[in-house]
Image (tube, rainbow, N blue to C red):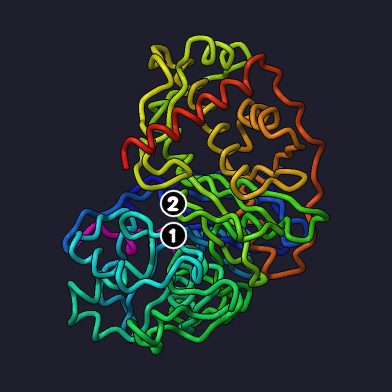
Amino acid sequence: MKAALWCIHLMADQRHIAVFDAGKTSCKLVLLNDENYAEVEVLRQEFSVLQGPPYPHLDIDAMWSFLCDSLAIFETKYGIDALAITTHACTAGLVGADELVLPILDYEYEIPPEVATKYDDLRPAFEKTFSPRMPGGLNLGAQLHFLRAKFPKEYASAALYLTFPQYWSWRLTGVARSERTFLGAHSDLWLPKQGTYSSLVGGEFPKKLFAPMSLAGDTAPANEIAAKATSLKLGTPVTSGIHDSNASLLPWLDTDGAMSVVSSGTWAIVMSVGGTLDRLDPARDMLANVDARGRAVPTAKFMGGREYQMLTGGAVGEISVSNIEAVIANDTCPLPGRISGVGPFPSGPGGWTGFSPETDQAKIAGATLYLALMSDTCLSLVGTGDRVVIEGPFAKNTTYAQLLTALIGCPVHLSTDTTGTATGAAMLLGSARPRVLGPPLEPMKIEGLSAFRDRWRKLSAAGSALKK
């Protein structure tokens, strides 16, 4: 393997579920105890997008090498009883009999304007798909339209269009499947209320390109090719696969009462279980996700992990209440707009409420307050329910969580899973037992926080209006 491989050894047990979790910037193979989903070991590798030709695309060969090598390590050390798959959204590949006919497009690629404009005339209305028009290739329908328009020969030669989790499952089992949590993630290809394909499938794109529908937890046996490449035992069950945000949501679906989940990573995905679709506004990057049981879930999102890295420049350090108070007093809070076209203020003004920070500590404090303000805005849009669970990297930022508690005025709980995405994916192989919530956090007490939030929202909204 060309890149370094990091591993964290945690504990050992007898029966194990491996989870392949392909994120936007890194891939993980997580080994879990199948009795209580405790982590045994984690292997991780960073990946870069290949810039071309023929367009920016994922380094699938490197990802496959990582997966094979990591599975071999776990199989040798512990034995693997089953493999679950989960990946980020907006990614799929055109395949022939046994390989890709084109590289898998990076969803941040800006599709040429003339192609994008023609697609806009074809896509179904938001009221049917609950899928907003997003920049680049963040709608799978737009990606497929681009590939058809620019690479007609390869497009015509494809047998199937496999969404990302199902692509990996196909490579490991030879069984091709489609799956609704992935198709339901702003693809333009799915109707969440009806639980079926949109008019694009069978209209613009032949239905034969789409494999038979499966549930995320349906399994197929690892075949001889996979067993040889990965050292998995022949016949090891492999799930069809699930969209990562819905994997994060799955552990909480049986928790009593209405609740919201903030699933964090490169993206912050805010989902309100049991909420209504009537409030969804496509102009504010709101949509309906489809959960593992096929139900539409109102969702808002922003690129929180990416923005935090941009705002801090990778700086690390501890912050306290006094640092947040200084951000408010010195007027050094970021405004949305660094990543155009996404989030509740998709045309945000950028910049800062006042002065930009000069120290790393001020940058971290400003970025943390920004995450809380954006999360609060998303929750206000989709409906908060009676409690909120924070999952993923944001759950490690207690200052952020206490700020969010103060802003929304309802209980906020931290997921104790290091990676709730892996836990949810693994639960598909057993009974998805409700998770036990720990005690809620105490809200951070900061004088003037609500007034600052109101001013920040007005500046963000006004900047968005000026850019339109």
Q: Are marks 1 and 2 in contact (CB under 8 Å)?
A: yes
Q: Relative to 458, is 274 on the left or the right?
A: right
Mark nearest the camera among 1 and 2 is 2
Q: In this figure, which residue is indicated by the disc labeled 2?
A: 283
Front-most of 386 and 438? 386
Residue 225: percent from left, percent from top: 43, 79
Q: Position of residue 214 (x, y in %)?
A: 57, 81
Mark before the other along the chain sequence, 1 or 2: 1
Q: Residues within 10 Å of mark 1 (few under 14, many from 20)?
A: many
Asked whether the viewer can see residue 404, the reply is yes
> In the rendered image of this protein, does residue 316 appear above or below residue 218?
above
Residue 99 on image: x %, y %: 32, 78
View extreme (bottom): residue: 208
Identity of the residue drawn at 83% across and 55% down: 256
Q: Is 356 located above or below residue 135 in the figure?
A: above
Secondary structure of the residue carrying tag 1 is loop
> In this rendering, does residue 236 appear at all?
no
* Extent of the magenta region: 55-69
Magenta residue check for 66: yes
Q: Residue at (60%, 60%) from the top-left corner?
A: 246
| Residue marked by disc 1 | 132
For residue 154, side relative to residue 282 (left or right): left
